[in-house]
Image (cartoon, rainbow, N blue to C red):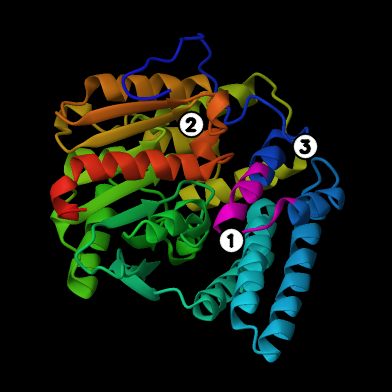
Amino acid sequence: MTNQESTPRSGDYSTQRLSQRYRFADPNMDLFFLGALGWGPAGGLSVGEAFYIATQIEDGDGDSWVRAFEHQGEVLNAQADTWLERGWTRAAGEARLKAFACYRSAWQFVAPGERFAALFHASQKLFDQAMTELGLPATRFTVRYGGGELPGHFYQAIDRSAPTVLVIGGADTCHEDRFLSQGRYYIDRGYSVALVDLPGQGLVQKQGLHWEPETERPIAAVIDALIARFGVEPRKLALLGMSLGGYFACRAAAHEPRLAAVIATPALFRPDELFAGVAKQEADGATTSDVERKNRQVLLWKAGVADISELIRRWDGVAADPRNVQVPFLSVLGKQEGGVWKKQTEEWHASIRSAHKSFVILDAETGADAHCQGNNPLRLAQEADGWLREVMRDSWGSR
């Protein structure tokens, strides 16, 4: 289901990200297990590996999740070392990237602290080693911002005149996992790709940099760095924002003139409504599992607040103004998204003033109807790539 099609209103303004069960009864665990499966085609775990790990996990028990993913990461890292000693460099890199995916999944349900940081740093080391062993054109870089540094990776296209896609994740991500969810697909399609953590993403919050309403400011700093260090041309620069990154994308579209195109999945432009929905579910007595509690602690840490009520107060009235958007904009929505995500994406698309706007709705038949197309990331890349080649035709020359 594609451009200009409308999704039915259900009256459901929930904040859910999945409406069907894949493996686990716990919805948070199921969402991130689905994410781990979705990374497979880009170099993450195979279906067999992911489901083996699942057999070691007790549904809803975060500690068993961490142990199972970390152990498999150790196994895969050891396998990579064995193959590297035998001169099988590519196989080593492939196993190393899988090990990264394991450590990345492991820290998902760890509360803030030394354990979280240790798993995170281990995943970063494995990612960089995998990039080297796979011979991928990855350059680690940092962006000075707010008294700290925003980390990222840049992948230079073989054709140095090709457009660049800047991929921004959401509340639960780090920039390295965006390589598996989207980045590698654009590299394979001939784009240069930039991946970066904004304030409150990855481990940036350890520097005292938390989510901030005026997200166009750190994005502007990132664009400055991409231009200065890598020669990126703004007329060939597209931004893709995912989940809470959809708000970052909407905000950039409304305030940052140096973008040739913007994509959001979904298009979230009033984040306070999402946060209020989470608070309402808590007030209504929604059951909170071990993994949800730990994940919530991490998200509050990323936001720099003590509890959800403080988050709501800090973000009250924060919004991106659709009336300011003239840049070509693609809004993407999976039909499993809860009502808040659906409602805002529809309203955003209807209200923005861009002459080149499109709305893609992905239903169950596409296999890409989950939150941010986590069940079929390739479909998101296909939709985004096709649309970008239409609206940035001049940037591709005769392609």
- As measured in the structure, the alpha-carbon distance from the residue carrying label 3 to the one carrying label 1 is 23 Å
Residue type, mark 3 in image: Phe
Q: Is residue 368 left or right of residue 392?
A: right
367 in the magenta segment: no
The answer to which of 233 and 169 lies nearer the viewer is 233
How far apart in space, not on screen, are marks 1 and 2 (Cα)? Answer: 33 Å
Q: Which stretch is magenta?
A: 34-47
Q: Is residue 370 left or right of residue 269?
A: right
Quadrant of the rendered image containing residue 158: bottom left
Q: Which residue is mark 2?
A: 275
Residue drawn where x is 71% and y is 42% of the image = 29
Q: Earlier in the sequence, mark 1 or mark 2?
A: 1
User: Which SS class for mark 1?
Assistant: loop
Q: Secondary structure at mark 2?
A: helix
The structure residue drawn at horizontal position 25% and vertical position 68%, both measured from the top left corner, is 159
Disc number lying in front (1 or 2)? 1
Task: Say if 266 sits above or below 205 in the image.
Answer: above
Residue 24: mark in rendering:
3
Residue 375 in the image: x percent, y percent? 59, 39
Residue 239 sits above or below residue 228 on the image: above
Reply yes or no: does residue 40 show up in magenta.
yes
